[in-house]
Image (cartoon, rainbow, N blue to C red):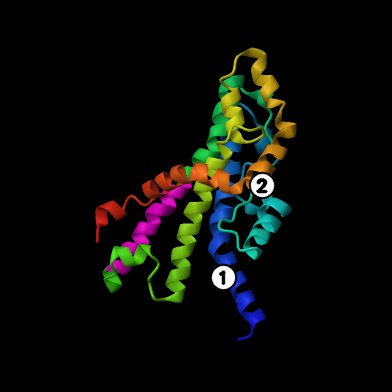
Amino acid sequence: MNYLGREIISFLTQLIVWGPGLLLGVILHEYAHGYIAYKNGDFTAKSMGRLTLNPLAHIDLFGSILLPLLLILINSSIVFGYAKPVPINPGYFKNYRRGIRYTSLAGPVTNLIIAFIVGSLYGLFYYILRILFNFPIGAFLAGNIGSQLLTIIQNMFISAIYINIFLAIFNFIPIPPLDGSKILASFLPGEAMYKFLRMGRFGFIFIFVILFLGGRIFWGIISPIFSFIYNICLWWQYIIGS
């Protein structure tokens, strides 16, 4: 097989590995925002047809397709993206501060729940392989499965966990318009909350700097948190043993 053929196969493999976890993460993230907003009195997302699990209602051309494809093409160590933000009108909230707080929490908390569930299913996947092929856990976690198909499935699990942990941590950053900024703002007194939220127009500049100019520094800061959460998602490794 020539170089171009190998590159195409590599790209398609990475797309299969990263795609499901990314779409699951960004779609459920936005759905959770809309659902909690609805429970707090805001019917905006529901009235606009966004309170649905239909992927087509949430996919953003750049954030859900082009950005992940670009990151795969440049062999990024982690692939991420975003869906179209669910429309929310805080003016409808029964309690303004509580509505903003819990609606903002819903997205990243959902990503953490997804990561934990996928991690648990990953453990079930290993348990089945252990019964069938007597796989030692050390070799499994190191990726030494010996089957290309099983390796791809294993990487799909790992990638889904990685993506959702990253989305959760990233969205908890208290920089407008990320979810963390709204959570923080809900605890600020009086006019300070509104002034802080209005900084959202400049927030994307800081986000760009963090991701593309200070990526290594950012990763160095979140890496211990990331590893801690990842190990919680793989809780079964401490029970099953070697």
Taking the magenta stretch, the answer to whether it contains residue 124 is yes
Taking the magenta stretch, the answer to whether it contains residue 231 is no
Q: Main secondary structure of the magenta part?
A: helix
Q: Nearer the viewer, mark 1 or mark 2?
A: 2
Pick whichever, 233 or 96, lies toward us: 233
The reply, left or right, for residue 225 in relation to residue 68 is left
Residue 38 seen in this snapshot: no
The 10 Å Cα crowd at callout 1, few under 14, some 14 to 19, many 20 or more, is few
Q: Which residue has dot 1 on it?
A: 13
Identified at 35% across, 66% down, the residue is 140
Question: What is the x, y in percent for residue 50?
Answer: 66, 42
Q: Which residue has dot 2 on it?
A: 213
Kind of element beneath mark 1: helix
Magenta extent: 114-130
Question: What is the x, y in percent for residue 3?
Answer: 64, 81
Q: Amino acid at mark 2?
A: Leu
Identified at 31% across, 55% down, the residue is 237
Quarter of the figure with residue 175: top right
As displayed, is residue 178 above or below residue 23? above
Pick whichever, 14 or 57, lies toward us: 14
Which residue is situated farthest in the top direction here? 190
Which residue is situated farthest in the bottom direction here? 1
Identified at 36% across, 62% down, the residue is 141
